[in-house]
Structures are given as C-alpha cells and as structure tokens.
Image: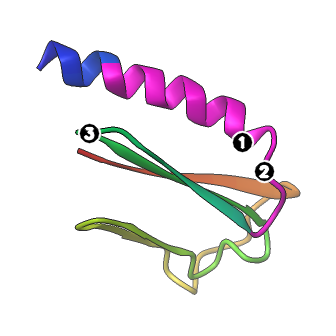
Amino acid sequence: MQFVKAASEKLSNMSDAFFGRLVPSEDLVIKTVNLAVSLKKVSANDVKGLGMKEGPSEFKLPSNIGNVDGDVINAKVRTI
C-alpha cells in the first residue's frame, strides 16, 4: 500500500506540472502500471456537464451546476 501512496503522490505532482502546459479543451492521460490520472483543462463555461472517464472510473458533473468563477478549470480523475 505504501508503494501506491508514493506513486499517487508522484503522479499528483506531475499532473500539477502538466496543467500549466495544457490549454483549454485539451486533455492528457498519465499512466503507470497500477495508476492512471486523466487531466482536462476546460473553460468555466464548459465545466457544466463535464464528463471524464479512465478505465472503470467515470466522473460527470451535472449540467445544472451553478456558475463557476475563473477563466479555466483543471479537472483530474485518478484511478487505481
């Protein structure tokens, strides 16, 4: 379990670095043998109804979500 925790922390740090390079509407998947992180940068308007899927994990925001402040939103789905 300690290995998974350490790998998860490294992927989290890598994803933070990649978010700085992504442009809105661009996505990226970082995979290791045991973990995957799906990253997507969207505009505040496009976050409503945002859906992301990586392997068996799926994430979906409702389309009736309230207003979101900011220019861009960084979304991340992590799977083990």
Q: Quadrant of the C terminus?
A: top left
Q: Residue at x 72, y 55 (%)?
A: 73
| Secondary element at tag 1 | helix
- From this view, report whether residue 26 is shown above or below residue 45: above
Determine crowd level at label 1: few under 14, some 14-19, many 20+ residues with C-alpha closer than 10 A: many
Q: Amino acid at mark 2?
A: Leu
The picture places residue 76, in percent across and down from the top left corner, at: 52, 50
Q: Earlier in the sequence, mark 1 or mark 3?
A: 1
Cβ atoms under marks 1 and 2 closer than 8 Å:
yes
- Residue at position x 49%, y 80% in the image: 62
The region drawn magenta spans: 7-25
Which residue appears at 88% of the width and 57% of the height? 71
The kind of secondary structure element at disc 2 is loop
The image quadrant of residue 35 is top left
Between 75 and 35, the residue placed more toward the observer is: 35
How much space separates mark 1 and mark 3, taking CA atoms?
22 Å
What residue sits right under mark 1 in the picture?
A: 19
Question: Label 2 belongs to which residue?
Answer: 22
Which label number is shown at residue 33? 3
Give the spatial CA distance, label 1 vs label 2.
5 Å
**Looking at this rendering, what residue extends furthest in the bottom direction?**
63
**Would you place residue 70 above or below residue 31 in this image?**
below
Type of amino acid under label 1: Phe
User: Marks 2 and 3, Cα distance to the nearest angstrom?
Assistant: 24 Å
| Residues tagged 2 and 3 counted as in contact (Cβ below 8 A) | no
Task: Give the side of residue 64 with respect to residue 80, left or right.
Answer: right
Left or right of residue 69, residue 62 in this image: left
Question: Residue 30 at x, y = what percent?
Answer: 49, 45
> Which residue does the image show at 11% across and 20% down from the upper left?
1
* Amino acid of disc 3: Val
